[in-house]
Structure formats: structure tokens, C-alpha cells
Image (tube, coloured by chain):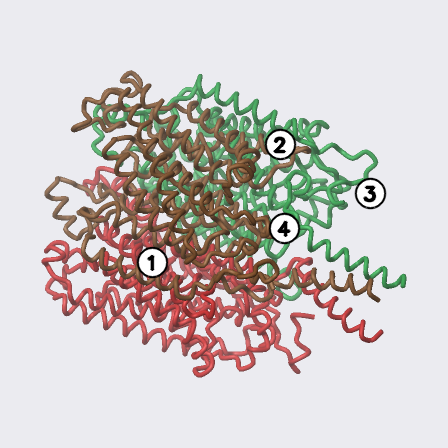
Chain colours: A red, B brown, C green
Amino acid sequence: MMGNCQACCNRPKNTNIRISLPAICFVWQISMIILFGVFVRYDEESDSHWVEYMHKNNITSHVENDFYYRYPSFQDVHVMIFVGFGFLMTFLKRYSFSGVGFNFLIAAFGIQWALLMQEFANGISSCFIINADFCVAGCLIAFGACLGKVSPVQLMVMTLFGVTLFAVEEYIILNIIHAKDAGGSMTIHTFGGYFGLVISWVLYRPNLHQSKRLQGSHYHSDVFAMIGTLFLWMFWPSFNSAIANHGDGQHRAVINTYLALASSVVTAIAISSLSHRRGKLDMVHVQNATLAGGVAMGTAAEFMIMPYGSLIVGFCCGILSTFGYLVLTPFLEKHMKIQDTCGIHNLHAMPGLLGGVIGAITAATASKSVYGHEGLVNTFNFVDEFANRSVGTQGAHQAAGLCVALIFALGGGALVGGILKLPLWGDPEDCNCFDDEVYWELPEDEESIPAIIEYNNQMDSKRFDM
Amino acid sequence: MMGNCQACCNRPKNTNIRISLPAICFVWQISMIILFGVFVRYDEESDSHWVEYMHKNNITSHVENDFYYRYPSFQDVHVMIFVGFGFLMTFLKRYSFSGVGFNFLIAAFGIQWALLMQEFANGISSCFIINADFCVAGCLIAFGACLGKVSPVQLMVMTLFGVTLFAVEEYIILNIIHAKDAGGSMTIHTFGGYFGLVISWVLYRPNLHQSKRLQGSHYHSDVFAMIGTLFLWMFWPSFNSAIANHGDGQHRAVINTYLALASSVVTAIAISSLSHRRGKLDMVHVQNATLAGGVAMGTAAEFMIMPYGSLIVGFCCGILSTFGYLVLTPFLEKHMKIQDTCGIHNLHAMPGLLGGVIGAITAATASKSVYGHEGLVNTFNFVDEFANRSVGTQGAHQAAGLCVALIFALGGGALVGGILKLPLWGDPEDCNCFDDEVYWELPEDEESIPAIIEYNNQMDSKRFDM
Amino acid sequence: MMGNCQACCNRPKNTNIRISLPAICFVWQISMIILFGVFVRYDEESDSHWVEYMHKNNITSHVENDFYYRYPSFQDVHVMIFVGFGFLMTFLKRYSFSGVGFNFLIAAFGIQWALLMQEFANGISSCFIINADFCVAGCLIAFGACLGKVSPVQLMVMTLFGVTLFAVEEYIILNIIHAKDAGGSMTIHTFGGYFGLVISWVLYRPNLHQSKRLQGSHYHSDVFAMIGTLFLWMFWPSFNSAIANHGDGQHRAVINTYLALASSVVTAIAISSLSHRRGKLDMVHVQNATLAGGVAMGTAAEFMIMPYGSLIVGFCCGILSTFGYLVLTPFLEKHMKIQDTCGIHNLHAMPGLLGGVIGAITAATASKSVYGHEGLVNTFNFVDEFANRSVGTQGAHQAAGLCVALIFALGGGALVGGILKLPLWGDPEDCNCFDDEVYWELPEDEESIPAIIEYNNQMDSKRFDM
């Protein structure tokens, strides 16, 4: 009964993806193999000529292989992408399979495409696989806005375009504008957040209220989502430090992010309690707004923002993000036609934007007295053609980078949203959203509880017939 | 119906924390920002002057930044604090939100206060953030004894005092007495365990049986708790080695803890089976007693206790801890008025005490023939004013450290328990404990199952009326 | 009512393990302590003489202690063994306690025995504890085939023999034949897979259909299983690289495994969708077949198989493994009398076999032009008595290694199966398999849902009586 919608639709959509999903998977996976065959090799640190490279460059220990600097952080990031994002999206009562499963599919596809996109010429190395995970994070954020309303085929298409846009945007921001963005406040969160919101706006479903019954959580699905939240929260210091400079860069990025996150937990919970008549907490806020501090430290994590500065960032973001869930998400849905299932506006878009601004200000106010001469050069990488850049100029370039991220997000979102609106992709009916039943074989006994309720209802009505 | 108690209380307590929780969160978070602003800076390894520091000290590689020695261990400890402790406390059928959520709140607040407490003068570094996590562990242990019976406001107050007491106690034990306690058998587990038990004793609830219906677990809540158990169990070697000496110190601490833990799993399960009429296992023992070996290795992990010594420690602790759950917890509740929800007496207090004793004995029996001269000096840090300390003296000082931990726990617990007994903090009624409904907005459909049961019961009774 | 089988059995089996399980645990744990006391010491890197060892060998930094090269990988492997394998086996609706709990028990016992088996003479070190985890993985794989049909006592016996066989087999393959197998396609997966399948064949239960009602999953148990899947998937690069060569060896093993895994997710999901009438995905495939790429890269991960080569391996394995679940598992059950609960044939045995073959081919086609001279020597460890071995010979030896793994698996499985068939071990009745109730005290309220269903059924029938 559930899963077909003769009740409310005259001509129900075709959600059969038996041809389209396998076709797209095979075509793309085979393309990946061919493109990797042509373009991708190991770099010097993962190639078996490494020992010769060591001799040539007077490297005396294997520990200088970047692998040992980056791999622990990489694994933390990897957990964030697959368990963190995946389980964060299991909170809906009947959409946990899709939340964690589609996240798995598009991330696994996306990282391959991301590896190709970012680096055609050089070989792959631990730095590149971290960056591939970062790259895919933008698309997973966008997935959050569309959760429950799109088909896996649409998600694959969105990922293909999203990763491509990300790679270009990141190249412009980091290499051409030479802005710093180690944790991706701009490149990942601002881009991913607004990209997803625009897609969600284009795909607006006026009758989504027909799926209202499935839009809430279940007691245990909320606990599953906390697995996602906590792994994101714990490993965010690794996310923001994974590709930071060796030594003090990585070290400082960890400390700043750690402090900002701790601070945003406290204020998010405070606002959550304050907003309820009897001071009760809301799981949505605990699951999401507690993470906002990490997002907002993405750009400035490497900088000398000072421990108390990090606490202030977290303080503001915890408040801002919780207010977002309380006020902005309903507002956006009602007045702006943006249906944002996971509230990515509050968790990624706004804090990301804020993070970009904080980064610009922190860069513009950097000084040799605080950083030391070498410290300043290393932190902002003022070398080669950027050797004479002043911190003021750097601040302006940071701001420019933020604008580029926004432009790519809005333009790219409109484009990709348009493509996803085509009636080809097997997306569900308005009355059939947030339902695993459309794309998954569900365990039989799962129906037992609704079945009992229905049975009882029937009994009830029968009783009156007697 | 649930959540108010007109049935059994004439003047129900006010559990509305809408003012108190946000107030305490904001006041403390703002204080943190101010205090961090005044007192906390980056240390030389996380400051941007690091490169200059390297030159000055002839450090040739970034890999010598302590970050690379400690960060993987730190992340493991971090997972233990937030996922390990958090999920271990989700085992109650209707208290999973509070278990994982309040743990998140107090740990995030506590680590900030801990950073301040432990180090006003020096800057923060990876070692300090590990220690902040350790610091908070003591309070999370105490939370385990009070689980389900206190409000989040009480937990915040308990954490503030607990962290303060911990910092003073740890300073006395490690710096003044110069006892070794890398994994905190004394400073963390003995202190946290007895601290929580005394608080629980002060807050004794004579009518707690009125909440009996909610004091058990649910099939899936027990599986959630296993997530906590396993992450604690797996990462305990990192916990005990995180701040051990570089090189063999960390290495040996890992091996000893690994062996003790493996051994305590086997004996805990043996006793669990032996204690049931038909040999059936009890999830409570599997979730908790399996971890006792790690607690008891906290002090001696760094020492040359030998692989078989570690196995013996785990062997004894697995038995002891399971007996605790079978015999001592009911005894304490019935005869000592200590209601210990999670059984922290069996998992932390007793094994911690034992760990302190084992540490004292192992230290007192250390010899140059086993350790080597340099090894002995390094392991016990016999330098500067302690250069002439004998191993016998060290053993006595270890024992003295254990006494200090106990004194702080008992005295501090009585003090904090007294404060928490004030009728200000919004704690629940005796008939309303172990219930998320008091402090959380719960998903609507959660009530469906009880509703069905109730519905059926009504039908049943109606039937007889017909 | 459930848990005894008077309905279908005349003389029900005795599943009381109150004597046998504790007895076996105590006897073995005490034996471990004695054997460790006699045979096991710390090695030079974990002994307190390490500083003297550094001086003697001109080691200038603690970071050269192998601990820092291996420990992050070790912890990832540790998570795979306890959370990965453990939670992967929680998918059954009423066997989650046993899945994760028995996995915990046998792994904790097995790692001790494995440490002893592999290294009587040398001391233990981080390399050995990684290897102990590897060792136990073979037995956990075999557990997958028997899941739900054996008692914990049988599992302990199986682990004792399994680890012993593994240690001998691994010694022959790695040290005598000098085959390379860093990630254990042959030694772990082929051996563990066929070992378990043969045991399952020997223990064939003709009336297993009597437990059909419990052989499916539950919505939330499937989500729990995804925790296992994802931690296995994410950390598989660490598994395959944990004991690879320092430097480029570990680095390359990570990249190759990462790519193979990504590729097998995409093809596994494609085939899963293709095989369903309406293109719906099956959780069984997502939970298992997505991992096949990691298994098949176990041998060749260190080799210069090239990024596109890794993608091809994953591509094929994702397809092969999903087909296995669709076609081979039912076939094996129907025609070969092999009841393979978790489908280890598709996830471990077949891809492991394939991995061995890929390893042999890749080794045989290695060349100095690709590897460089030093690279070739390092990768295949062509030193000492193997200094003159050609790559062709190495390929042949790889193939020989695979045969040894198979022989040990088949012979060992038959032997151990025979032992487990003895009517001593308290295994459940055919009508009582896949049921936690046999070996665990379950939470009381768990029965509420079946109770309601039953109640309704009774009502239903009564109704007709009226």
C-alpha cells in the first residue's frame, strides 16, 4: 500500500531505476578506469622509486614520507565522510537505509572523480586522497538539503557536476586568488551549502506535506544520528588540519577547531533549552548546531586567531546555527520555497560564510609581531609570485575567494537543479518522499508495527459496525 | 501522562530548566572566553614561531613536533570520551538521548575548564588537550553513578567542581608526590569512581523503585551501548599510552593494556555464564566488566610489568568486576544507600584502586637488572630533585598518591553532593527518573508502542465489561 | 515459549553452557598466563632498554621506533576486528547480542593465542599485535559462515584450532615459500573463507528451515550492520598497509586499496539494482559486496598494480560478489549442503582467491623498468637467500602460497568441523537457531512486540469463535 500513490496521484511517477542506476554506474565506472589508465600514476612518495628519491634528496628517514604526516588525519576525515555524514542522515524514521546507503554510493563514486578532477598531471598521494574526500564533502552537504526527495540517479548526476564545479572553484580560490582555506569554510561549506539550497529551491515540491507522516524521527533513528554527529564533532580538528602546514600549522589548526567546537556545543544547547516552553532540548539542535563551530573555523584554523578567538567563534556559531533551525528553516520553507531537509543552511551555509569572513578579517589583521617573520611567510605561503603580498591584500583576496565560492554555488546550483528537474531520473512522488520503500527492499517484519496500528484501527471501525 | 506525576506526588518538583540551564551555559562560556583571553596562549609547538624554535634548538624535522607523537592517541582518547562514555550510557530503554547528549554537553564544557585549570601559565599544546580529555573522564565516570537521577544543570555544576578537584588532585599526585600514573588508575578512575559514588550516596532516593519500569534496557539500546563498550575497549591502549614517554614508554603501555583487556574479556564472560542457572550471559557484564583490565593497568602500563603480568591483572579484574555487578551493586543499594546506575564501583572504583596498588607494588619491585639504568631513570623520571629516589621510596609515594586520590574523591564528593542536594537544580521526581521525556522533546511516534499495548489492555478490560 | 522446542523436538538438545563455557575460558586463560610467563617478553622497541638500543644503533629519534609507523594503522585494524566484524554480524533480527558479543569473546581470546603461536622466541611489539589481530580475522570470517548455528563453546574451540592452523599456514606461505601477502588475500581471506565453509558443510543442518522466522533482518538491525560495513570499508586501506614496507610500501598499499574499494561500491550497487524487478537495492549487497574490492587487493596492494589496475580489481569484485549473493549462496545451500549465514563465500573466499591470483600475476609481470632496481628488491624483499629470485619464480611461489592456504582451509575445516560435530558443545536445536534467547538474558520488554502480534492473532481467532 505504501509506496504507490493511487490515493493522491492520477499518473504516478515511475520510480523504477532498474535501468538508469546500473547504466549510470557502469558507464561512469568504466570511464573512470579508462581515464585513470590514461592520466593517473603514483607520485614520487607512493611510487616504488621512493628509495631512490630519498637518496637523491638527502631524505634520511621513511618518516619524512608525507604519508606519516597525513595518514592519521586522512582516516579521521574518511570516517567523517562515510560514518559522519552517513549516520547524520539516518535521523528520519523510515529513511535510514537511504541516508547511509546513498551517502556511501555517491561518496565512493565522487572520490574517484575528484581524484581525476583535481590532478590530471601529478600522481596520487595521501594529500590527494584527503582532498578527494574534501571534494566529495561539498556534494554530501548538498545531499542533506535534498534528503528524501531525490533518487539515487539524481544524486549521482549531482555528484558528477558538484565535484567538477568544486574542483574548478577550489583551483581558482587556492591557486589563482591564493586564498588560504585549509578546512574549507569557503570552498566546501559555503559552496556545498548554497549549491544544495539552490538545487532544493529549483526542485521545490509544493505538495511535500503529503509526506508529512514520514518527515519526523524515531527514538532510535535519533540515536543513530548521534553516531554521525559525534564522529563529525570529534574528528573535525583533523578535517581542518589535514592539509595544513606541517608542524605548527597542523598543531594550531587542531587546537583552534577543538576549542571552537567545544564552545558551540555549550551555546547550541543553551539556545535549544531557552527556546522551549519547559526548557526541553531538541535533538535536531544537538545533532547539528553543535558542529557549527568547526565549520566556521575552516578558514582561520591555521591562523593565529588565539585560543579565546576560537572560543568566540564557536560561541557565536552555536547560537546562530540553533536560531537558524528555530527561525530560518521554517521561514525559508514558507517564504522562499526552499525545503532544506537537514537544515544545511544552518549547519554549513551560514557558518561557512561566517568562517570565510572571519578568515578574511584574521588574515587582514595578521602582523609580524604576532606571527614572527618566518611564521607569517609560512602561514600565508607568501613565496614566489606572492612574496610581496601584504596581509591587507591577503585579507581582500580571502574575501574575493568567498565571493567566488558563492558565485559557483548559486550558478552551479541553478544549472544542476535544472538538469535534475528533467523527468528522467526516477524521483519519488510528493506523497512518497522520505520513504526507503521506494528504493530499497525492506525487511518484512518492519511492516509489523504499522500493520498492528492499522489492524487496530480496522478493528476499531469494525467494532462500530457490529 | 508519563512525565508528570500527579499519581504519586502531591507537590511535584519543578523540572523546568529553561532559565537555569541557558543561564549557567552562557555565564560559564563567557567566563571561559574572558579567562582564555587573559591566560591562555599557544605553546612553542603550536605557535607560528615554531620554525624559529626549530632552528634555535637544532630540530631538523617537523616530525619532532610533539603533535605527531601524540595526535593519533589523542583522537582515540577523544573517541573514548565522546562516543565511548556517551554510548555506554545509552543502555537504558528511555534514557539514550540523555546518556549520549548530557555526556556531550558536560564533556564539551569540562574540557575548556580543564585546559584552564591545568595550565594557567604555559600555552596549550596537544599534550594539554589530551589531558583535558582525561580530566573530564573523571566527571563522566561520576555521571555514570548518577545517570537518570540528575538534571543537566546538576551535571554542569558537578563538572565544574569535579574538574577543579581533579586538577588539584592530579597536580599533587604527579608533581608534588611525583607518583607515575600515565593511564590514571588513581587520578581518574579511583577519584572519579568514589567521587561519583559519594555524590550518589548524598543524593540517595528512597523511592527510586517508583521508576522501576524504566530502569531496564531495550534490545536495541543494549546494542547501542556495545558501540560505547567496544570503542572504549579498543582505544584503551591509546588512553594508557597517550601521555607516556616517547619511544618504549608509549609502546609498552600499549602492549600491556592490550593484553590486560583481552584477558578480562575472557574471565568476565566466564563469570557471567557461571552465575546464571542456565549459563546465559548478561549484557551488563559484557558491556562493563570486560573493560576492567584497562582501568587496572592505568598506573602500571608504562612499567616493566611483563606480558604475563598484564594478563594476570586482566584475569583478576574481569572476575572482580563481574562479581561486583552480581553481588556488590545490589548490596551497596540495599545496605549502603548508594544507587549506582551504571555500576561504576565495579568498572572504575575497584579496578582503579587495584590499579593503584599494582602500580605501587610494581614500582617498589623495579630493578636495574630488569629496566637497565637509563630505562629506570626514564620510566620513573628520576631526574632533578628526584634523582636519588629509590624504587622503594617510589613505591611508597605511589601508595601515597592513591590515598590522595581517595581523600579528594570522598571529601569532594561529599561537598559536591551537598551542593547538588539544594532544591535549585530541576532534578526529576523519584517516580520520573530514567526518563528522557523530562528534559527532551521526544519524537511523537515513539509513544506508538506503549499506546498499542495500552489500547489492547483497554480493549481487554472493555471486553469483560461487555 | 521461544527458546524451548517441545513443539518440534522429542529429545531437545542441552544448550546449558554453564559449566563448559566458564571451564574452557578459565583453563585457556590460565594456560595463556603460564605460557606467556615462560615464552613472551617485550622486544627491543618496547623494552625499557630502548634508549640504550638507540645509542647502540645510532638511532637519533624516538620516532624511528616502529610504534610510530604502525600504531595508527594498528588501531584501524583493531576497530575492523571488533567493531567492523562485530557489527557486521548484528544484521539478524534477534541475534545482534551474539553477533557482536561472541565476536568480542573469540577475538579477545584469539589474539592472545595468536601472539603465542606466531612468535615464541622474539618479544612482542606493535607489529606482533597487528599480526595477532590479522590472525584472528581468519576465525571471525569462519564465524560468519556459522553465525546463529553454533554455541560460544564451539566458537572458542574453533578459534583455538583456527589460530593454530593460521599460524602454521602463514609461516609456510610468508617465510618458507616467501610469497608476499601484506593484506592477507591468501592467508586470511582464502583460508578463513574456505575454513568456515567446510565447517559449515560438516555441521549441515537439514531442518534449519524451522528457524526461518528468525533468519531475516530488522530495519534497525540492518542499520547497525552498516556501522560494521562502514568501519571495515573505511579502514581497509589500513588493513592492507599495516605491515607493508615503510615509506612507499605503506603509502601505495593505501592508495590501491582505497581505489579498489571505491570501485566495488559502485558496481555492487549497480548489480543489486539490476537484479530486482523494480531496481530496488538490497541491504545484504550494500553491507557485504561493497567490501570485496578490499579483500581482493590484499596480496597486490603493495605492488605497482597502478591506480587503474586497482579500479579494475574493485570493478570485477563488486560484480562477482553481488552475483555470489544472488546466485551462489542459494545454490550452495540447496545443492552443496553449505549453509553460509553471512555469505562469506562471496565476501571473503572468492575475492580472496581472486586476490591471490591477481597477486601472482602482478608479481610475475613485475619489471625493473616499472619498479626500479631498488624498488623491485624492496617490494618483493629479494634479499639474502632470495636475492636471485626472478619475478617469474616469485609469481609461481605466489600461486603456491595460494594452494597452501586452500589446503590448510579444506583440511583444517574438515578436522575442526569433525570436532565441533561431537555432541558436547551445547549448540542449539535446528528450530532454535539465530536466537539470542538461547545464550543471553534478554531485556524483558523485548517480548512486547511479538506479544502484541500474538495477542492480536488470538483475538482474531477468538473473534471467529464468538
Report which residue position mark 2 lands on.
B275
* C-alpha span from label 3 to label 1: 58 Å
Q: What chain letter is assigned to the residue under label 2?
A: B
Report which residue position mark 4 lands on.
C325
Name the side, left or right, on which A159 lies relative to C92: left
* C-alpha span from label 4 to label 3: 33 Å
Report which residue position mark 1 lands on.
A261
* C-alpha span from label 4 to label 1: 43 Å
Instruction: Say whether residue C64 is visible.
Output: no
* C-alpha span from label 4 to label 2: 41 Å
Determine whether A79 is above or below A453 in the image.
above
Label 1 neighbour load within 10 Å: few <14, some 14-19, many 20+ = many
Which dot, 4 or 1, sits closer to the camera? Answer: 1
Report which residue position mark 3 lands on.
C7
Say which amino acid is labelled 4. Tyr
Q: Which element is circle 1 on? A: helix
Q: Quadrant of residue A13?
A: bottom right
Say which amino acid is labelled 2. Ser
